[in-house]
Amino acid sequence: AQKITQTQPGMFVQEKEAVTLDCTYDTSDPSYGLFWYKQPSSGEMIFLIYQGSYDQQNATEGRYSLNFQKARKSANLVISASQLGDSAMYFCAIAAGGQNFVFGPGTRLSVLP
Amino acid sequence: DAGVIQSPRHEVTEMGQEVTLRCKPISGHDYLFWYRQTMMRGLELLIYFNNNVPIDDSGMPEDRFSAKMPNASFSTLKIQPSEPRDSAVYFCASTGTSGGSSYNEQFFGPGTRLTVL
């Protein structure tokens, strides 16, 4: 079975600064995918970024990048140049051995003006 | 593309009543998922379908919950009888397995906020 751990229940960051949200995972499957989703206060789930277990390079999508350290089983999300609109819950998820996604408990990010 | 459509957006019902939540996945997607989100338990996968066939329903809490997918464009999640502890936001999501990637992102609907009094 897969598991996601997000050890930061809440984080604060100053506007325009970078922030790293931690995610560690556990799976025995050599093939897996890692995902980050954003959930603003309005409630919708927004896909941010994806990293495949065999991808050689870290994924990037605009201001989002994924710091993938396979040996450590970590997939931290880095948000550069934080904006007020980045304030939200952030969920890390893993899919392995099929399309069964397992989500972590989330980290609430607050961006301060 | 309209995205994943869920109805109703909000549902308030009394304990013991039957509740039916509906979902229309993105056209062409062959996987459909039902999740439940609560403060206490976070985001839980209840069941998922592939090509309209239930693949894993191990997350369905109990026999009061049932889900169907009669065709590729429609799914329902039914709770009968409903209980106050079923109060949660229920999300439907879909994904496709095209594009050569083993795993593709799930696209979520807006959710149905269920309150059982």
Image (cartoon, helix red, strand yellow):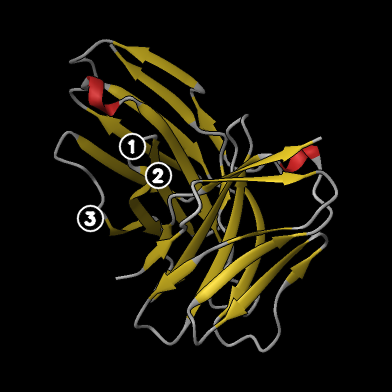
Give coordinates of residue A35: x percent, y percent.
57, 64
Q: Residues within 10 Å of mark 3 (few under 14, many from 20)?
A: few
Disc number for residue B10: none
Q: Are marks 3 and 1 in contact (CB under 8 Å)?
A: no
Residue at left offset 44%, top offset 55%: A104
Residue at left offset 47%, top offset 42%: B92
Tell me the quadrant of the picture where the C terminus of chain A can be found.
top right
Report the mark closest to the observer, 2 or 1: 1
- Examine the image and state in which quarter residue B29 appears: bottom right
Give coordinates of residue B102: x percent, y percent.
54, 78
Q: Is residue A104 above or below residue A76?
A: above
Residue at left offset 43%, top offset 71%: A25
Q: Earlier in the sequence, mark 3 or mark 1?
A: 1
The residue that mark 1 highlights is B40
Q: Residue flagged by tag 2: what amino acid is it?
A: Tyr
Give coordinates of residue A69: x percent, y percent.
57, 81
The residue that mark 3 highlights is B58
Give coordinates of residue A102: x percent, y percent.
40, 60
Q: Residues within 10 Å of mark 2 (few under 14, many from 20)?
A: many
Residue B103 visible in this rendered orientation of the protein: no
Q: Is residue B75 left or right of residue B65?
A: right
> What element does badge 2 sit on?
strand
